[in-house]
Every structure is written in C-alpha cells, then in structure tokens.
Image: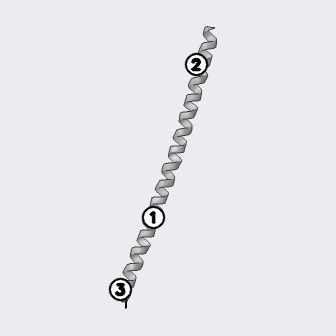
Amino acid sequence: MKTLNSIAIEYLLRNDSQNNNNKSEDITREVIRINAEQKIKAQRSLLFQMYDLEEQESFFV
C-alpha cells in the first residue's frame, strides 16, 4: 500500500514532467514559427533579386 508521502512524490514528479513537456512543446512551436518566418524572408529576398536582375536586363537592352 502506498503511503501519503509516496503518492505526493509521484504527483509532484508527474506534474513536473507535464510542465516540462509543455515547455518543450512551446519551444518547438517557437522554432517552427521562426523557421517559417526565415523561409518567407528568404523567398522574398530571392524574389527581389530576380526583380533586380530583370530591371538590369531591361536597362541594358
């Protein structure tokens, strides 16, 4: 039979584990959000580079 202390310790360990899991999920979400933002910025940068090249070609023609 479990003692009150062992039940309390199991509860605290389980609760702490859930809190750490939530923190991990928050970090994962933030990393995914940052990666998505960087990908969008890179795509915009490439688009602007292509636009600049197009303007340069029309300038020399």
Q: Going 51% across and 54% down the picture, which residue do you hit?
A: 29
Q: Which residue is mark 2?
A: 53
Report whether 26 appears left or right of 5: right
Q: CA distance from mark 1 to mark 2?
A: 48 Å
* Image position, residue 22 (x, y; %): 48, 63
User: Which of the marked residues, 1 or 2, is nearer the chain's N terminus?
Assistant: 1
* Image position, residue 11 (x, y; %): 42, 79
Mark 1 crowd level (few <14, some 14–19, many ≥20, 10 Å Cα): few
Among the 4 quarters of the image, the one containing residue 43: top right
Q: Which residue is mark 3?
A: 5
Q: Residue furthest top?
A: 61
Mark 3 crowd level (few <14, some 14–19, many ≥20, 10 Å Cα): few
Q: CA distance from mark 3 to mark 1?
A: 24 Å
**Secondary structure found at label 2:** helix
**Secondary structure found at label 1:** helix
Q: Amino acid at mark 1?
A: Asn
Q: CA distance from mark 3 to mark 2?
A: 72 Å
Report whether 9 appears left or right of 41: left
Q: Which residue is mark 1?
A: 21
User: Which of the marked residues, 3 or 2, is nearer the chain's N terminus?
Assistant: 3
58 shown above or below 23 = above
* Image position, residue 46 (x, y; %): 55, 29
